Amino acid sequence: MKLLENKTALITGATRGIGKGIAQTFAQQGANVAFTFSSSVEAAQELEKELMSFGVKAKGYQSNAANYEAAQTLAAEVLKEFGTIDILVNNAGITKDNLLMRISEEDFDTVIEVNLKSVFNLTKAVIRPMMKQRAGSIINMSSVVGLKGNAGQANYAASKAGIIGFSKSVALELGSRNIRSNVIAPGFIETEMTASLPEETVKQWRDAIPLKRGGTPEDVANACVFLASDMSSYITGQTLSVDGGM
């Protein structure tokens, strides 16, 4: 029995990195997958094909999660196409790193909008259908940086810490409707984004991690499967660090 059989998941920012890993693992576990992407149409079409090869329904939507109206429209379209939204994974995120002295107002606002407001937008869009179903699992992607901060990432850390407070509040509000809201805080996960870092930097990162390796998108995806599935049916309002012990 696959853990997510007959469930439909909506995953934001899924054409690369952690989002892609989640989409692939969810499909392997039997979930139908609706996912969003911002610009990479070809990558989205390839991912659709790959997900469908696991015998599930999959569809990519070009949508900007940071835009309130776009998020509401997206949820309506996914509901029409898939019938239910059982799982929401808010994964879309960006960085615009700089020391506080140098962060522009625009770079602060953009990061908050894409990383934090998108979580509000989409959660707001799916809670009505989830309340009707009296079931749902919302998984929000924070970061180790949201828990302990990081020099040069005040904007990113604020957005990722904000996600934790938001998720805990949603867990308290919607628990009585059997809707769960949890957070995953990844540590150093090796993706396309980290591949561009100097090898020396990556080595220092790995050496500082108790498990002595960077994580993989699959490491994060497996934790998501747990929180999305009925295995975690009595778990809500929690933050699960997937960081090798950082």
Image: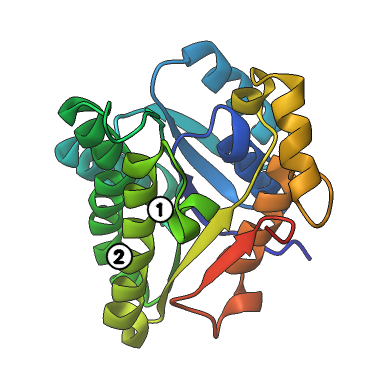
Task: State the CA–CA distance, disc 2 to disc 1.
Answer: 27 Å
**x, y percentage for residue 161?**
37, 58
Q: In which quarter of the image is residue 207?
A: top right
Residue at 47% over, 29% down: 60
Q: Residues within 10 Å of mark 1 (few under 14, many from 20)?
A: few
Q: Is mark 2 on a helix, strand or loop?
A: helix
Residue type at mark 1?
A: Gly
Q: Which amino acid does label 2 sit on?
A: Phe
Q: Please give the label number shown on residue 83.
A: 1
Question: Which quadrant of the rendered structure holds the N terminus?
Answer: bottom right
Residue at the (24%, 65%) spot, across then down: 128
Q: Which of the pair 246/204 is nearer the observer?
A: 204
Q: Position of residue 162 (x, y in %)?
A: 31, 58
Q: Position of residue 182 (x, y in %)?
A: 47, 68
**Image coords of residue 98 (percent x, y):** 37, 28
Q: In this view, does 36 lie to the left or right of 27?
A: left
50 above or below 147? above
Of callouts 2 and 1, the N-terminal one: 1
State the SS at label 1: loop
* Quarter of the figure with residue 110: top left
- Taking the image as shown, residue 180 lies to the left or right of residue 68, namely right
Please count the marks in the image: 2
The quadrant of the picture occupied by the C terminus is bottom right
Observer-nearest of 11 and 158 = 158
Q: In this view, does 79 lie to the left or right of 6?
A: left
Look at mark 2 in the image and give the residue it sits on: 166
Question: Which residue: 36% across, 73% down?
Answer: 168
Above or below 163: residue 239: below
Choose top left, top right, bottom left or bottom right for residue 57: top right
195 relative to 153, above or below: above
Q: Residue furthest front?
A: 101
